[in-house]
Image: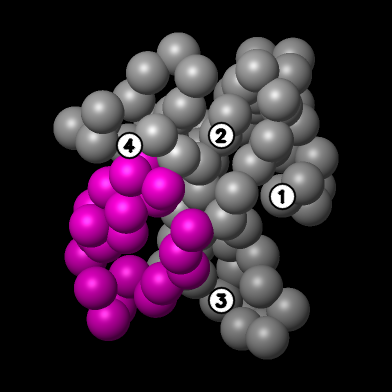
Amino acid sequence: MNKQYGLELFHCKEINSGSIFEIQGVGNIDELKFFKVKKFQCKSLKGRGAKNGIHVIYAYLPIDQKIVFLEIYFKADRKNERKERIFDFINMHK
């Protein structure tokens, strides 16, 4: 399943594949939430499967049903998302 379809299922149909997690402690509100996507395959990382260590961070605006990708990183290089990037996004949308 591609991630676009997985995101639509998660946000529009409330079907959880177990690969999308809400990021806590960043000021999520009903109009703006932040999520981390794990467990997806990358064609460039053949043989690594869905647990390749790549994480994607995005903002979800439920009213507009809009997704804004904020960050992609390799887990071996960094343990967690850059929360300052999330806070910058929040400040831009005030």
Amino acid carrying label 2: it is Tyr
Q: Which label's residue is closer to the chain start, 3 or 1?
A: 1
Amino acid carrying label 3: it is Arg
Q: Which label's residue is closer to the chain start, 2 or 3?
A: 3
Amino acid carrying label 4: it is Ile
Q: Gap between marks 3 and 4, in whole Å?
A: 25 Å
19 versus 80 height, above or below: above
Q: Circle 1 sits in a helix, a strand or a loop, which is it?
A: helix
Nearer the observer, 8 or 63: 63
63 versus 86 height, above or below: above
Q: Gap between marks 3 and 1, in whole Å?
A: 17 Å
Q: Which residue is mark 1?
A: 3
Tag in front: 2 or 3? 2
Q: Is residue 52 left or right of residue 65?
A: left
Q: Which residue is mark 3?
A: 48
Q: Which residue is mark 4?
A: 23
Q: Circle 3 sits in a helix, a strand or a loop, which is it?
A: loop
Where residue 21 appears, x then y in whole percent?
Answer: 42, 35
- Tell me the number on the disc at residue 60: 2
Nearer the observer, 87 or 13: 87
Q: Which label's residue is closer to the chain start, 4 or 2?
A: 4
Q: Gap between marks 2 and 3, in whole Å?
A: 28 Å
Q: Gap between marks 4 and 2, in whole Å?
A: 11 Å
